[in-house]
Amino acid sequence: MRNFAVFILLLQTVFGFGQGKSLGDIEADFQGGKAEFKQLLLHEMIYPPKALEQGLKAKIGYEVFVKKNSEKMITRPLFTDEEAFNEEAKRLINLTEFVPGAIDGDPYDSKKMVIIKFNPKKYKKMVEQRGYAIPPKPANASPKIEVFSSDKVDQAPTPLLPKGTSIDGFIYKQITYPPHAVKMNMTGKTILEFVVEPSGNITNVHPLHYLGGGCYEEARRVLGLIKWNPAIKNGKVVRCRMKHTVYFNLPNTQKRSPLETIAE
């Protein structure tokens, strides 16, 4: 009897039984997960100049209310520092898209605690990795954070590639068929949705259609190598949502090339 009671206690601890949760519960999260949020910080963070010069660190946290329709709102600070740090943290959070919590597949209004750390030494390494101190910002960039669909802008984003190189051709040359997918004879497509920022970077990348075996992750890696001409609306550079389909086909399985990518 005692062993049975211990077993029930373990179930409650590991799975949350008896605490209002079930195996089907999902909490609010970053669109694309934590790894994608880190990519956004890598490419879009602007360290407050004076703080960077003085070597100051900071840890900023905010509670974000995520509606079931994925709209978000910063509700309250968890911990703050100098105003320059606070403002940059809020700017980065506003650039981030979120997925609401869900119970058995049904989304609900939920909360996400977001923490952003500012470290001058790590930031300098980030700058070396991304190749610029401040993300490029066109003079005619819109100050709004609204994201437009590609059919609602005057000029949709276009990839910055060498003359004569198509995005299909670029991806075909750069992509490597994941070994596990080859071993499992895995073929199919993965559809990636993302936001093209005024800086020409892509953020908030996530799968609309996921293909396992490392295929989605490889498609995400190669897509991240491409810089973009941002979208234009009413003469202003704006954020724009795009999607791209990448097909993974092993030789002799279909008439398509082994790897073919199609822009949506």
Image (spheres, rainbow, N blue to C red):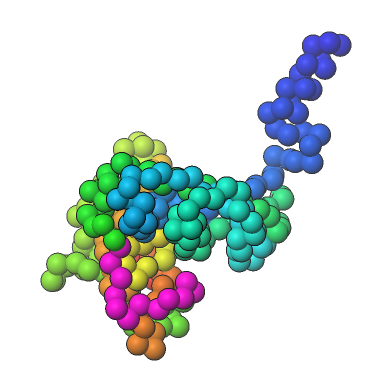
Q: Is residue 160 visible?
A: yes
Residue sticking out furthest to the left: 163
Front one among 132 and 234: 132
Dividing the picture into quadrants, the one containing residue 245 is: bottom left
Q: Is residue 32 visible?
A: no
In the rendering, at what x and y percent does residue 167 appear? 25, 66
Task: Decide: is 112 above or below 154.
Answer: above
Q: What span is colored magenta in the figure?
A: 135-147
- Asked if residue 231 is among those painted magenta in the image, a careful observer would answer no
The residue sitting at 48% across, 48% down in the picture is 116
Residue 67 left/right relative to 223 = right
Magenta residues: mostly which secondary structure?
loop
Residue 37 left/right relative to 132 = right
Residue sticking out furthest to the bottom: 234
Residue 53 left/right relative to 13 = left
Front one among 254 and 55: 55
Front one among 184 and 90: 90
The residue sitting at 30% across, 71% down in the picture is 137
The residue sitting at 47% across, 72% down in the picture is 145
Which quarter of the rendering shows the N terminus? top right
In the rendering, at what x and y percent does residue 178 appear? 32, 42
In the rendering, at what x and y percent does residue 76 appear? 64, 56
Task: Decide: is 56 above or below 189.
Answer: above
